[in-house]
Image (tube, coloured by chain):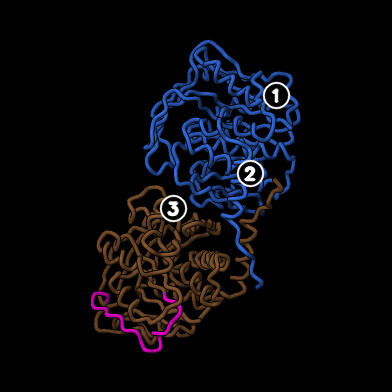
Chain colours: A brown, B blue
Amino acid sequence: MSIVVVGTVAFDTVETPFGRGENVLGGSATYFSTSASFFTDVSLVAVVGEDFPDEHVSFLQGRNIDTAGLQRIPGKTFHWSGRYGYDLNEAQTLDTQLNVLMDFQPELPESYRDAEYLFLANIDPDLQMQVLEQVRKPKLVACDTMNFWISSKPEALKKVLQKVDIVVINEGEARQFTGEANLVKAARQIIALGCKRLVVKRGEYGVLMFTADTVFAAPAYPLEEVFDPTGAGDTFAGGFMGYLANTGDLTEEGIRQAIIFGSVMASFNVEDFSLNRMKRLEYKEIQARFSNFKALTSFRDVSL
Amino acid sequence: MSIVVVGTVAFDTVETPFGRGENVLGGSATYFSTSASFFTDVSLVAVVGEDFPDEHVSFLQGRNIDTAGLQRIPGKTFHWSGRYGYDLNEAQTLDTQLNVLMDFQPELPESYRDAEYLFLANIDPDLQMQVLEQVRKPKLVACDTMNFWISSKPEALKKVLQKVDIVVINEGEARQFTGEANLVKAARQIIALGCKRLVVKRGEYGVLMFTADTVFAAPAYPLEEVFDPTGAGDTFAGGFMGYLANTGDLTEEGIRQAIIFGSVMASFNVEDFSLNRMKRLEYKEIQARFSNFKALTSFRDVSL
């Protein structure tokens, strides 16, 4: 099954203690679709400016990503600059130039509108809603967001959260959105808005997934070398949704496996700048790391 | 099998956003031994002053803890005061009155010296070493420490770490001790000192356990109500060592189970102030929560 994703395609300028990337390929939809493309067909909805090089479009198409929904309009591509300290858990945004994002009106190609899986990656919640309304009968809709939209457009965001099946956000954002310090309580509040599941991303601490009556905890993969956490959350979401779209298994067990595949993809992504690790990633590496996750987390039951 | 533990027995004055406890029972050896007593016999080595009430000693003895090594000497009992904010992850120490701890010379009763399991809870590393030297042929020795000793007695601490089988410390302390921001690298450095295993406590994010060639990740139990994190680490260590001493199973699998039992005990301890939750805890609750940990973490393997 194929996924439609709306989000950003961007130039990033990123500094970490281990190096610097200037005007490298980035954006929530870029990371998401590249990651998901290892598991399923992906159709991209995003906007770039006249300065966006063909080689990046070729890269996406080379991963079999449908770019019919990638608009190119006059102006410059969205540009994000950020910096990470040694703990690598949270980016400090240095500069945000929205550029063409300010005039973006997502218009889905007809071939996208029967998509069964839809991911509303981090972008203006009004744009997320516009895309949601254009997809006729999705089987599963998930969304992400960020602190900026929580504080600037809380009502528009709330409307999106009420329409989706799965909300995927950072731990700090779950707390910020609900004003609740306890994560279990914050999760209950978000689920009470109407979604079925909440996936809370905790950076190097992994993921907690909540439903009304279950919790699943997945660790992050312990890595000796982390170069650049940019895009880890979107890469996680891409692996998660990509695997779900691949299997169509929306049982608790199927969704837990998808969480692990998402975690696997994120763990690779942080091993190099931009999408460099994704560019040389092979499926057999994904399989091997899934097995490593099993070894990392398994313990024997006791006969009590 | 029985465990000998050396550490502090203290009065704590603790403030959290949910309440305040004044001069309540605390101390690393208190939390450890109470937790371990659910699984095995425990012999306590610690010091208190003349102000320490008999009811606390009776409580420990009521849990079948051997208090022959609990010295009572002239002066006041060690007193720690601290405060937690809403995130509850790290205590701010407001006041530390060492009192009788300053003159403590641990002297093990003869009956303690053949102990097979020894836990050197958080206390001056010189005292940890004195106790270690008095136990003739322990099968397993583990130790904890804290930031204060890492900065004030790094050499004495290093000597202790070189003599133990398992080091149990906080994430921040692992980074502080090694000066290494990456936890996997920090773990390798600590294991290179000579211990076989490192157990890294990460508060609400759970535990990572390292050996030279394995890693195990256990989440913390997601709780809707956390009242007081004081003693969570010692309670974890008590459940961990207590279960190991109970089963004698020092294989990787046995030790992983012990990590989960430690996590179970810590999750109960934070549900109330001081040792109040431990005082009313029943073994069937421990069993039920172990099962919940299994449900919390399990995911199906894939046929890849």
Placement of B122 over or under A285, stated as above or below:
above
Residue at (40, 89) in percent of width and height = A111
A230 vs B178, left or right, is left
Q: Which residues are magenta?
A: A101-118
Secondary structure beneath label 3: loop
Q: Given the image, on which type of amino acid does mark 3 rest? A: Asp
**Left of A30 or right of it: where is A289?**
right
Residue A1, given in percent of the width and then of the height, sits at 51, 81
Task: Indicate left or right for A302 with B200 as reference.
Answer: right
Q: Is residue A171 visible in this depiction of the protein?
A: yes
Query: In the rendered image, which quarter contains the N terminus of chain B?
Result: top right
On screen, residue B13 above or below B172 = above
The residue where tag 2 is placed is B287
The answer to which of A133 and B137 lies nearer the viewer is: A133
Residue A97 located left or right of residue B126: left
Image position, residue A227 (x, y; %):
47, 62
Dot 1, how many residues are within 10 Å of its Cα: few (below 14), some (14-19), or many (20+)?
Answer: some
Residue A117 within the segment the image draws in magenta: yes
| Residue B198 picture quarter | top right
- Residue A41: image location, x then y, percent: 49, 82
Identify residue type, mark 2.
Gln
Local SS, label 1: helix
- Name the residue that disc number 3 marks: A87
Q: Chain of mark 1?
A: B
> Residue furthest toward the bottom?
A110
| Helix, strand or loop under label 2 | helix
Q: Which mark is residue B134?
A: 1
Residue at the spot 52% in from the left edge and 79% down from the top edge:
A40
Q: Is residue A264 magenta?
A: no
